[in-house]
């Protein structure tokens, strides 16, 4: 049934930009100065969950690296690394420059000095940037020569809320690229491309792909989760085709697998909530969870020096505001999951 499990995963980066040519072309134009050794302004990607913002940010950066191999690409998940120190540390860890640093005690200045010392252009993707407790890290990166930032958020309003005016002014210079929700037809096309490379021939019909797409309501992450779950069921039962029953069973579970992720890291700092309370805040309600069946697979996980002062601006964001913001996001996603259930 499953010939290539990786293409069914959320983090898989495809070889083409199905139904996202406009957005990818716009992002590539924004990054083009790097091909000539010049600095670029930040890029802000907005749109609802599951519309390809992260996937095609990586796709565009991969294309850039094919042209400029010395570019270093870094992806930081701000849902998990939501403090200023954690985001900077994860960036350095991705660059393999954090082996002698400490996640919780190394100073911000030392982390920024290390980032500034990278001897190649860096493209830093800050994913779910609105989940940061302290948005001054956006200013930090902008003020660091050689670092280009791609900021990804579902809600531009949440990102700007409580942000220091100097940080906000930096975002006003950013290239803004918006991603609309997929239509059911577009989602079916995306799923078909994954099926062609990941499942045996004739494993699923076009009508079934449209059914999955309708259930996903424009969210490619949910659609892929449903397809993957249905395929795993068929594979476990040693069948070469996916049945309508497989899809019916996969829809609620597929939605649950796309619920807010638990934090995989913790960092104790003044004013922060505990790792345990953060996990509780991000967990789906007990009524939405169930044990995974035995066959379910585990989801694998350069600019001029005058760009700005290293000293970060004072911001009105706080750990409490960041926690409340993540809770609002969780509730929104939970409501979407229940709406899907109610329509079934």
Image (tube, rainbow, N blue to C red):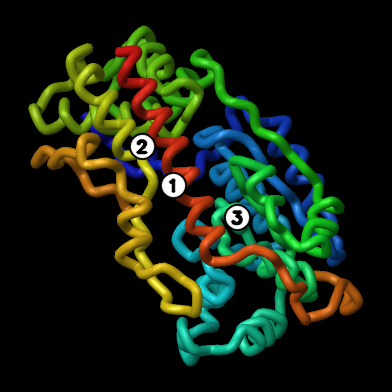
Find the distance from the CA under tag 1 to the CA under tag 2.
9 Å
- Residue highlighted by disc 1: 11
The residue sitting at 86% across, 53% down in the picture is 173
Where is residue 62? Give x, y as percent: 61, 52
Lateral position of residue 70 relative to residue 324, left or right: right
Where is residue 307? Give x, y as percent: 87, 72
For the residue labelled by badge 1, is the local secondary structure a helix, a strand or a loop? Answer: loop
- Residue highlighted by disc 3: 129
Q: As displayed, is residue 176 above or below residue 337?
A: below
- Few, some or many residues within 10 Å of mark 2 (<14, 14–19, 20+): many
Lateral position of residue 261 relative to residue 52, left or right: left
Lateral position of residue 260 relative to residue 318, left or right: left
Pick out the residue farthest to the bottom. Answer: 100
For the residue labelled by badge 3, is the local secondary structure a helix, a strand or a loop? Answer: helix
Q: As displayed, is residue 118 above or below residue 192?
A: below
Q: Where, by quadrant of the figure, is residue 186 drawn? A: top right
The residue sitting at 63% across, 67% down in the picture is 72
Q: Earlier in the sequence, mark 1 or mark 3?
A: 1
Where is residue 90? Give x, y as percent: 51, 72
Find the distance from the CA under tag 1 to the CA under tag 3.
18 Å
Of residues 86 and 277, the one nearer the viewer is 277
- Please give the label number shown on residue 8: 2
- Few, some or many residues within 10 Å of mark 3 (<14, 14–19, 20+): many
Q: Is residue 41 visible?
A: no
The residue sitting at 38% across, 71% down in the picture is 266
């Amino acid at each position: 049934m499953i010939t290539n499990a990786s293409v069914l995963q959320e983090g898989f980066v495809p070889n083409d930009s199905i139904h996202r040519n406009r957005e990818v072309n716009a992002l590539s134009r924004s990054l083009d100065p790097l091909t000539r050794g010049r600095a670029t302004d930040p890029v802000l990607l907005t749109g609802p969950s599951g519309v390809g913002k992260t996937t095609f940010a990586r796709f565009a950066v991969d294309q850039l690296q094919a042209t400029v191999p010395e570019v270093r690409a870094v992806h930081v998940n701000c849902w998990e690394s939501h403090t200023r120190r954690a985001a900077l540390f994860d960036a350095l860890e991705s660059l393999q420059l954090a082996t002698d640093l400490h996640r919780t005690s190394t100073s911000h200045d030392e982390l920024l000095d290390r980032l500034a010392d990278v001897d190649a252009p860096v493209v830093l993707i800050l994913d779910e940037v609105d989940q940061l407790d302290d948005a001054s890290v956006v200013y930090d990166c902008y003020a660091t020569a050689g670092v280009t930032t791609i900021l990804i958020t579902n809600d531009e309003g949440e990102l700007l809320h409580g942000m220091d005016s100097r940080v906000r002014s930096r975002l006003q210079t950013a290239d803004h690229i918006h991603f609309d929700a997929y239509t059911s037809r577009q989602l079916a096309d995306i799923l078909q491309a994954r099926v062609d490379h990941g499942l045996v021939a004739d494993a699923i019909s076009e009508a079934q792909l449209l059914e999955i797409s309708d259930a996903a309501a424009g969210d490619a992450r949910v659609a892929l989760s449903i397809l993957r779950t249905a395929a795993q069921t068929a594979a476990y039962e040693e069948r070469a085709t996916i049945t309508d029953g497989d899809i019916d069973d996969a829809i609620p579970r597929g939605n649950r697998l796309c619920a807010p992720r638990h934090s995989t890291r913790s960092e104790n700092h003044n004013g922060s909530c505990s790792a345990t309370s953060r996990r509780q805040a991000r967990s789906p309600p007990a009524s939405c969870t169930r044990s995974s069946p035995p066959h379910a697979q585990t989801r694998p996980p350069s600019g001029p020096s005058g760009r700005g002062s290293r000293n970060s601006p004072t911001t009105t964001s706080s750990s409490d505001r960041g926690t409340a913001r993540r809770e609002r996001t969780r509730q929104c996603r939970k409501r979407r999951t229940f709406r899907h259930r109610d329509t079934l």
